[in-house]
Amino acid sequence: MSDTDVTDQSAIADLEQDIASAIMRAEDEASLEEVRIAALGKKGSVSELLKSLGAMSPDERKVMGPAINGLRDRVTGLITHRRSALKTKALEARLATEKVDVTLPVREAAAETGRVHPIAQVMEELTAIFADMGFSVAEGPDIEDDFHNFTALNFPPGHPAREMHDTFFLPPGADGQRKVLRTHTSPVQVRTMQTKTPPIRVICPGRTYRCDSDQTHTPMFHQVEGLVIDKGAHLGHLKWILEEFCKSFFEVEGVKMRFRPSFFPFTEPSMEVDIQCDRSRPGEIRFGEGSDWLEILGCGMVHPNVLRNCGLDPDEYQGFAWGMGIDRIAMLKYGMSDLRAFFEADVRWLSHYGFRPLDFPTLAGGLSA
Amino acid sequence: MKFTFSWLQDHLEPTASFDAIVERLSLIGLEVEGVEDKARQLAPFVVGEVLTAEKHPNADKLKVCTVSIGKGEPIQVVCGAPNARAGLKTVFAAPGTVIPTSGLELKIGKIRDVESRGMLCSARELGLSEEHDGILELPEDATPGAPFAEVLGLNDPVVEIAVTPNRADCLGVAGVARDLAAAGLGELMAPKVKPVDGTFPAPLGVTLEFGESSSLCPAFALRVVKGVKNGPSPQWMQDRLRAIGLRPINALVDVTNFMTFDRNRPLHVFDLAKVKGNLVVRRGRPGETLKALDGKTYALDETMCVIADENGVESLAGIMGGEASGCDETTTNVVIESALWDAITIAQTGRKLSINSDARFRFERGVDPAFTLPGLELATHLIQEICGGEASEVVLAGVIPDTTRTIPFPLSEVKRLAGLEASEQEVRDVLEALGFAISGAAPVLEVVPPSWRGDIEGKADLVEEVVRILGLDRVPATELPRGEDARKAVLTPLQLRSRKARRALAARGMVEAVTWSFVSQEAARLFGGGASELALSNPIAAELSDMRPSLLPGLIKAAGTNAARGFADVALFEVGQIFLDDTPTGQRQAATGLRRGTAKPSGAGRHWSGTAGAVDVFDAKADATAALAACGAPVANLQVTTDAPGWYHPGRSGTLRLGSNAMAHFGEIHPAVLEALDVSGPLVAFEIILDKIPEPKAKATRVKPSLDLSAFQAVKRDFAFVVGREVAAADILKAAQGADKKLVTAVGLFDLYEGKGIDPDKKSVAVEVTLQPRERTLTDKEIEEVAGRIVAEVTKKTGATLRA
């Protein structure tokens, strides 16, 4: 080894040390780049050394080649490493300044604030249940004539049962007949029987009117009626349908029902139906348990006179019908206490008792799930 | 209809307990509305004998008593009653008893240092009367320790049943007993009524005078009992009348009331001394009045039926007697009336005069015509028994109608209609127990309903009788299979649209309301309604008088009410019916909504991320468009015209239409309309008539059109046009679209500018046009060529120039 060797070798070591400390001193990528150019750029110190290899003798090159190349590799490595460290540091510094208060409230989605009225929701629940049993939905006008609302339904003129209906009247028309606001949805049954050939299975939901207003009565309310006309449709089938309905609607395993003879002009035999419930908890009714009874609907076999009035032969066709208050069963299921609130459009009430727009009642989802 | 258990037992020898009878009543169609059983309520209260009553050492007005209840040691009770004295039999309540009126539980306590182990009770504390001057004084023979209710005869429970309009026969206790006997709960006791032989001709007659008009009185029977001594009726009768809520008056009147409730046979009694001449049954005459037994004077007319004498009208037939000829303690000769009346006349008269009497209630539902004369005889018996006297012969005007009719009853009907297996014997037993006469034999019985069952018309009625008595619980629930039909839509297109519109609007943050179908006449007029054919004859209130022509008045009013409650920013909608005329086709289904204040679809009110501005016409347009789209309307093809109805702001409203078919309106509500409804804005709204949306074409399959994806990239080009301010944006978009219907697949409007740099009567409209090549990538030259056509077309159609 010559002195020159020693000197050159130590010069390389010094250079390496200088570069290394410059790399470490670089506090950002730009100054690191300067260091890189100073060392590895075209005229950089390391590049110059590399260039000097060409002028060396093979022997010198043998010694200095690996030394200089090693220097270059180590410097390159140091810079890469430092760059990566600086990048991480810079990112961390930036992220540190980008903090937001994620507890700030966001605006509620429209689909969260919108509501569907309980009556509409319950109508859809009813439709889901009865559609599954082969029923379709029939509708009719709110303004009815005397024939469809009363006479066809076996309410003879002057009959006390007519008076029980507290009818709203419209002025007499050219024919002298007063139209009425339908007092029940039964005229839809009449219209259905007049236009369809049995077998018939329909439910008729809709608005109904009686001129009565107090704590538990409103001049407008909602009813749903069901009608089955077929050869051989009897009370036993009615019982089964209503049992299926109550189980599905109140979403219970089973519910005891009590059928009591009653009277409606348009059915014979006629019945009222009570369902089993438990009212022992304050402000809450549970169905399918307990030992109390609660009346929920009226029903019966369609009166032969009604069948005749609708053009059906009572010895050939028979059937049954039932009816109940939609508002009432909504109140029973969902626990509203005041019927009048249904129609007051108070957004507090609607938001509380209404249903989210995407909560479609489905049998698959358990109706109200 | 109320009765007591002992009253029932006049007609029924029960073979079942009281509780079993009560339970069964509801199940055979006589719904029990309530049972008042004082004996049960007052069971803890027993007879106590005061042995000693000494002055309280520490209180002047209190006494320290010792009380015996027949067993155990005498009990010390402190009592404040002035009548507490040794030897008195009174009512004792032991500690632990709950006092019915106060709901308080008695406890052993010390009153001024003296222990008291119970309470001696006043009538008021037991809820028996308002009497509170002292403790109850019971008869001396009362046995200490015995239940006190028995001593006072309060152990006769009162049952209240709801009798349906078809069962007038059960408006008498005897009829209830018959039903119970048929149901196997006891033996019916129905002794025949023996006629009382008259000993003299009736001193007055009666004629039915209806001339040419239809008779309102099929039959009228009367008789006189002379020499009666009227006074209070016997205790048993008073007790029964009181138990069912009637006030005993005097024996003669009480007998008529008793007959009304015992036999569903309303009667009337006149004081013969106050009747002048013969009785005439006729129509009332305009101008006539009657002061009735309720003390009120009623104006009569020719639609009503009255009983008159030479003094004028004495009674409103079948509804209420007159005061002038009524019976009181001085009556010695009484005329008893037992008549039949036309049910519809009774109902109409009662309604017209607002008289709800027990007689009216029964006559309009139907009494047993065959019992007209037996009822008169039974009343005679009762009057003679109580008041003595001598009976005249009976006078009958008119004819007792024969209601006999035969109904052929195939036994198979029970199974056919009710699904119930019942044997011939069971059917016969039930019907016979209810008084039906049966002849013939299976398979078809000949059934004659009893005279008191005017409601029985045909075989369905007979099925009801059989089923209700045998028990509806015997009818097995029978599955009704849904049939072979394929599953298909059960909703009509209109019903489906109502649903879809509802969900779409709710999903836009709107809240569904259900408002009245009727609005005030003023409101109806504001929205194009108010026709006389849609005004109710008997509205419940002036603000609910007319069928609504639009859902808007109800919703706007609701927005106002909510604002008054502090909820100014509301978005409400309703899906429901509106009325254009009174025919079935005049009813339409509308989906209507409004937004008030800052109730924007993106959220209302102030928020750190951006405060909502006032609602505007475009919010309403977006709502309408969303709902229309949800209902399947061809939204992309709809035209927007500026001819919304007059209740909208003329410059900020529009109509969405397909040619002449205007499906929806939207816009700001006219300020004058808001003012008339007393609701402040800003308020924007839309109305969709769901019936007007064209029904989708029926398709053979549900396959969607095939997806056509181009392999070539779409190109977007922006154009800024300067046009007159009056030019509709839609025309620019349409023109751009029309420049090349194949290549232009979308035109968006991304900037609108009026102001500095633009002529005051012009605006700048910037659009982005998407060109979608199908066969190959477009060359620059081709793009330029299309762009030129777009500019030319827009210029041609709208007079626009390309903005420099």
Image (cartoon, coloured by chain):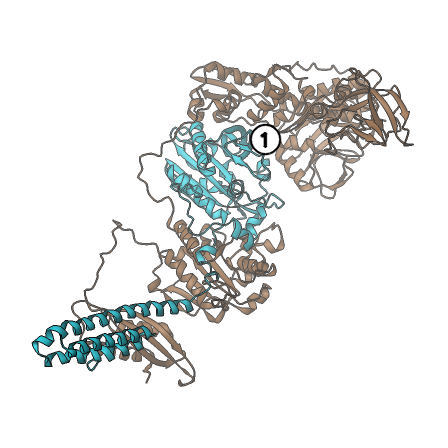
Chain colours: A cyan, B brown
State how many labels appear.
1
Q: Is residue B415 above or below residue B622?
A: above
Give how far across and how far down residue B50 sits, in percent. Answer: 85, 20
- In the image shown, does B574 or B257 lie closer to the viewer? B574
Give how far across and how far down residue B592 sits, in percent. Answer: 47, 58
Which quadrant would residue B381 be assigned to in this image?
A: top right
Give how far across and how far down residue B638 sits, in percent. Answer: 36, 64
Label 1: chain letter = B
Which quadrant would residue A67 be assigned to in this image?
A: bottom left
Q: Would residue B90 be seen by someone viewing this image from the given angle?
A: yes
Q: Is residue B88 above or below residue B208?
A: above
Q: Is residue A344 above or below residue B241?
A: below
Q: Residues within 10 Å of mark 1 (few under 14, many from 20)?
A: some
Q: Is residue B163 left or right of residue B742?
A: right
Which quadrant would residue B772 be assigned to in this image?
A: bottom left
- In the image shown, does B503 or B395 lie closer to the viewer? B503
For mark 1, what is the residue?
A: B164
Q: Would residue B462 be seen by someone viewing this image from the given angle?
A: no
Looking at the figure, which quarter contains the C terminus of chain B?
A: bottom left
Q: Is residue B311 left or right of residue B670?
A: right
Give how far across and how far down residue B760 sits, in percent. Answer: 43, 84
Residue type indicated by callout 1: Thr
Q: Residue at x 31, y 37 (%)?
A: B485
**In the orientation shown, which residue stands out farthest toward the left?**
A58
Q: Residue at x 43, y 61 (%)?
A: B623
Q: Identify the element where label 1 is drawn.
A: loop
Q: Is residue A147 left or right of residue B176?
A: left
